[in-house]
Image: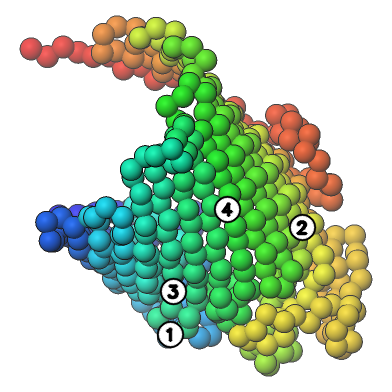
């Protein structure tokens, strides 16, 4: 097939948007799928291109965007301050074995050029890479006394940017095991090898990534049951002492024929020894006269989601959704990158004669004759979002919607993490929005 999209905007200099976003954006893509050898193999491809246009300031902004960081020192695509357009290409090519009783395998190869841009009509996190993703699976779909079915998969992911820098090397394995009761057990392990990060310094020099190992354990009950549960654990350990843990619990239940309830709670613990803070100018020629400042961060995040759907009658329904959230982060051990293509830091107050002193709003750092300040980056963010919707079909084909939406947010500096403080999000400063929509069906004979 063929797909074409276009966005045209009328922009003026009155609000500054003309210097920040594209005036027009077009994309074109085509895709093809071929089944081979009696449908045992599949070859598919997506090929596309993008074109964006705007004034010079907007195009510079796009080139500096976090999805590409073309201003970085190693990028083969230097910032073009005179251009008023960017043209990019992308492709995804898959070849996989999809037929057969037990063994399956496949390879996916992705290319996204540095100027490729889809964010006017969709969402993409990064470009400027070539990636190959390969896997081999063994599956067993014949039930017996020990299992209903299972799939064991091994995979690898390798990525390079357009300057030839290797940015990802990962090997992993996972097992999905369905018990005779159709409850599901899941286990996954990943090992990420040494590689370079081209975004850790936010457009600066390359920085070595941490070697890491991660583990996922999961359990889900049979989703055909009236009440279903999910338990999930994620853990990761990093070479430089960082660690992550994520715990998830969820339950979904059809309380009665007209009521369905869903609740999910997630608790995330993160200790990162290389959390980016900021970049400032500095007398450091080995890192292009910049100071790339990092710190340890100890972060705790608790979030919950609940949803209740009530069908009073075929023409009257009620829906309630709420999401309280709290995240706390404490920074410590500030330092700066010592050399490009490495991850060692000069820790302030410990290395190379540096001094650091706490102030009312952050820290003051002295390095020889240089002195600079670092803001207090600690945070304790509270948030609550909710929606309440009434849908009433007051006449055949004619519907009334009533919507009440809340969006509350608060940031408390220098507060300790306490899980029960999540309820304080319900009283945080926010916005209440009410909306009423009525549709009327006019018969047309």
Specify whether 4 is left or right of 104. Answer: left
- Which circle's residue, 4 or 2, is located before the other in the chain? 4
Verify CB contact (< 8 Å) between mark 4 and mark 3. no
Q: Earlier in the sequence, mark 2 or mark 3?
A: 3
Q: Is residue 179 left or right of residue 363?
A: left
| Eye-nearest disc, 4 or 3 | 4
Residue 216 numbered tag: 4
Identify the disc placed on residue 158. Answer: 3
- As drawn, is 291 to the left or to the right of 318? right
Q: Is residue 443 visible?
A: yes
Q: Which residue is mark 2?
A: 298
Quadrant assignment for the C terminus: top left
Q: Find residue 81 and report its image quarter.
A: bottom left
Whether tag 1 and tag 4 are in contact, CB under 8 A, the answer is no
Question: Residue at coordinates 81% horizontally, 78% vertically from top-left?
Answer: 347
Q: Residue at x 91, y 66 (%)?
A: 358
Say whether disc 1 or disc 2 marks the residue closer to the N-terminus.
1
């Amino acid at each position: 097939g063929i797909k074409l999209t276009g966005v045209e905007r009328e922009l003026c200099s009155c609000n500054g948007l003309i210097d920040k976003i594209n005036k027009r954006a077009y994309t074109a893509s085509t895709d093809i799928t071929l089944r081979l050898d009696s449908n045992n193999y599949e070859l598919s491809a997506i090929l596309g291109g993008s074109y964006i246009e705007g004034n010079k300031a907007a195009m510079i902004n796009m080139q500096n965007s976090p999805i590409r960081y073309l201003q970085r020192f190693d990028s083969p695509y230097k910032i073009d301050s005179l251009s008023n357009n960017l043209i990019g290409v992308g492709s995804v090519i898959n070849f996989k074995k999809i037929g057969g009783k037990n063994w399956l395998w496949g390879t996916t190869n992705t290319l996204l050029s540095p100027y490729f841009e889809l964010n006017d009509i969709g969402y993409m996190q990064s470009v400027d890479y070539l990636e190959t993703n390969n896997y081999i699976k063994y599956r067993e779909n014949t039930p017996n006394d020990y299992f209903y079915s299972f799939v064991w998969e091994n995979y690898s992911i390798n990525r390079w940017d357009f300057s030839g820098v290797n940015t990802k090397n990962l090997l992993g394995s996972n097992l999905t095991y369905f018990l005779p009761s159709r409850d599901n057990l899941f286990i996954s392990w990943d090992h990420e090898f040494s590689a370079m990060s081209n975004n850790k310094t936010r457009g600066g020099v390359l920085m070595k990534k941490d070697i890491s190992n991660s583990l996922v354990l999961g359990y889900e009950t049979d989703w055909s049951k009236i009440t279903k549960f999910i338990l999930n654990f994620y853990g990761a350990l990093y070479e430089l002492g960082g660690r992550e843990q994520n715990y998830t619990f969820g339950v979904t239940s059809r309380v009665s024929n007209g009521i369905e309830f869903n609740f999910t709670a997630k608790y995330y613990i993160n200790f990162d020894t290389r959390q980016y803070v900021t970049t400032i100018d500095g007398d450091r020629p080995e890192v292009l006269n910049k100071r790339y400042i990092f710190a340890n961060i100890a972060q705790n995040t608790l979030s919950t989601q609940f949803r209740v759907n009530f069908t009073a009658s075929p023409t009257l329904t009620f829906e309630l959704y709420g999401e309280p959230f709290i995240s706390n982060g404490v920074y410590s051990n500030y330092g700066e990158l010592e050399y490009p293509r490495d991850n060692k830091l000069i820790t302030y107050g410990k290395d190379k004669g540096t001094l650091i002193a706490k102030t009312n709003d952050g820290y003051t750092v002295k390095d020889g004759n240089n002195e600079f300040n670092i803001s207090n980056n600690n945070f304790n963010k509270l948030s609550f979002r909710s929606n309440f919707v009434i849908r009433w079909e007051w006449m055949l084909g004619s519907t009334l919607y009533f919507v009440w939406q809340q969006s509350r947010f608060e940031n408390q500096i220098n507060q300790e993490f306490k899980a029960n403080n999540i309820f304080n999000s319900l009283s945080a400063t926010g916005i209440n929005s009410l909306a009423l929509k009525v549709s009327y069906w006019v018969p047309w004979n």
